[in-house]
């Protein structure tokens, strides 16, 4: 019991500690592709520490929600990340690692951030919140269809069960899973505000979505939101790895050697995903806001087609 709790806490700590490193690697990869030296991969840690040491300035028109929401967003994102098996399956809280629950947790953070953007009453916050809700109205149905596609193949929505089913080799190559993978990558890009949906490095009022909602935050409040955004990126990468690339994951979390192999395999998958994200962002341009529904509509259609293929032919 104690050992299982230690392994579960180790996974939660690993996700929290490694999330800023993932963001640092993305920035470094993009800088090197632009023939710049770029920042250190540990710069996000320094940025978070600097923000935590600053005073939080709150507008006079802000309500209590404005102060509470950053901590709620961080806590809900961390819980969602902790429910996803990373280096080991069948952890202590694996029974609660349900894809629908994780989707609901991430959706609640999006709703809370949109409320925070509108709370102060600035025009930029309202623009960002409206755009965020427009993106969510298409991303969430696509995510639900992805969950249905995977659940019909694995027979469950629990991530540990899904990972074990994928590892057995009986699933094979399925068109429906390929469509679900492409749709999930599109949703992950949109949910994390990455190019081509949004540019996390821009502060142009006419193009930004996420940054517009957090313009009024500072100090420790902004640190919580930034850390939650980093955790969210790691969450989606871990979700993709758990569902579609579960190799190397320890089946018995109480074996230390299996856990170490699982950590190494998970780290390699995360680095590959982060580098691929950086290369992709440097290869394409940001699209206009009015074209984002078409982009997310493709994810919705792909995931829906995957579900229909499973109903038409169980072998696809």
Image (cartoon, rainbow, N blue to C red):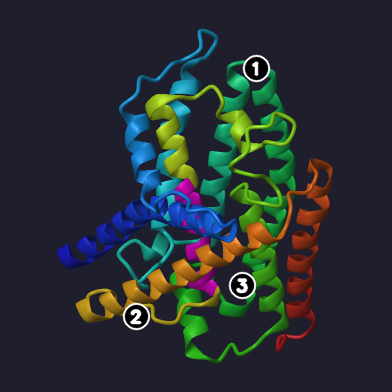
Q: Which residues are magenta?
A: 230-243
Marks 3 and 2 sit apart, C-alpha to C-alpha, by 20 Å
The local secondary structure at tag 2 comes to loop
Q: Residues within 10 Å of mark 1 (few under 14, many from 20)?
A: some
Q: Which disc is residue 213 wearing?
A: none
Q: Is residue 154 magenta?
A: no
Disc 3 to disc 2: CB gap under 8 Å = no
How would you rate the neighbour count of disc 2 (Cα within 10 Å): few for under 14, some for 14-19, many for 20 or more? some
- The crowding category of the residue bearing disc 3, from other C-alpha atoms within 10 Å (few below 14, some 14 to 19, many at least 20), is many
Dominant SS of magenta comes to helix
Q: Nearer the viewer, mark 1 or mark 3?
A: 1
Secondary structure state at the residue bearing disc 1 = loop
Q: Quadrant of the N terminus?
A: bottom left
Horizontally, residue 10 falls left or right of residue 224, namely left
Mark with earlier residue (2, 1): 1
Kindly give the residue lying farthest to the top in the view shown. 60
Where is residue 121 drawn, in percent x and y? 64, 15
Residue 298 in sight here: yes
Q: Is residue 240 magenta?
A: yes
Task: Give how far across and how far down residue 73 sits, in percent.
Answer: 47, 38
Viewer-nearest residue: 4 or 113: 113
Q: Are marks 1 and 3 in contact (CB under 8 Å)?
A: no
Q: Percent x, y for residue 55?
A: 35, 19
Judging by the rendered image, the residue that carries numbered circle 3 is 150
Question: Residue 113 vs residue 5: left or right?
Answer: right
The residue that disc 2 covers is 251
Q: Which disc is residue 122 wearing?
A: 1
Q: Choose between 187 and 281: the one closer to the eye.
A: 281
Q: Quadrant of the C terminus?
A: bottom right
Q: Is residue 236 above or below residue 117?
A: below
* N-terminal-most mark, 3 or 2: 3
């Amino acid at each position: 019991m104690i050992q299982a709790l230690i392994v579960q806490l180790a996974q939660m700590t690993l996700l929290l500690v490694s999330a800023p490193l993932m963001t640092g690697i993305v920035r470094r990869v993009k800088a090197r592709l632009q023939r710049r030296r770029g920042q250190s991969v540990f710069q996000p840690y320094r940025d978070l520490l600097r923000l935590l040491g600053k005073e939080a300035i709150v507008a006079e028109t802000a309500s209590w929600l404005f102060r509470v929401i950053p901590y709620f967003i961080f806590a809900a994102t961390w819980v969602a990340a902790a429910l996803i098996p990373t280096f080991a399956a069948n952890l202590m809280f694996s029974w609660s690692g349900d894809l629908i629950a994780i989707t609901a947790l991430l959706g609640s953070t999006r709703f809370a951030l949109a409320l925070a953007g509108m709370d102060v009453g600035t025009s930029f916050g309202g623009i960002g919140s409206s755009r965020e809700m427009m993106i969510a109205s298409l991303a969430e149905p696509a995510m639900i269809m992805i969950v249905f596609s995977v659940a019909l193949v694995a027979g469950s929505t629990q991530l540990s069960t899904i990972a074990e089913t994928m590892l057995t080799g009986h699933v094979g190559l399925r068109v429906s899973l390929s469509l679900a993978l492409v749709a999930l990558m599109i949703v992950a890009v949109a949910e994390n505000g990455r190019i081509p949906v949004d540019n996390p490095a821009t502060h142009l009022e006419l193009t930004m979505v996420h940054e517009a909602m957090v313009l009024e935050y500072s100090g420790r409040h902004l640190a919580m939101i930034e850390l939650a955004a980093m955790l969210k990126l790691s969450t989606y990468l871990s979700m993709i790895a758990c569902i579609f690339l579960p190799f190397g994951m320890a089946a018995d979390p109480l074996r230390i050697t299996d856990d170490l192999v699982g950590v190494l395999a998970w780290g390699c998958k995360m680095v590959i995903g982060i580098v691929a994200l950086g290369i992709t962002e440097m290869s394409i341009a940001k699209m206009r806001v009015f074209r984002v529904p078409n982009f997310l509509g493709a994810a919705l259609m792909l995931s829906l087609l995957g579900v229909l293929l499973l109903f038409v032919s169980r072998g696809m």
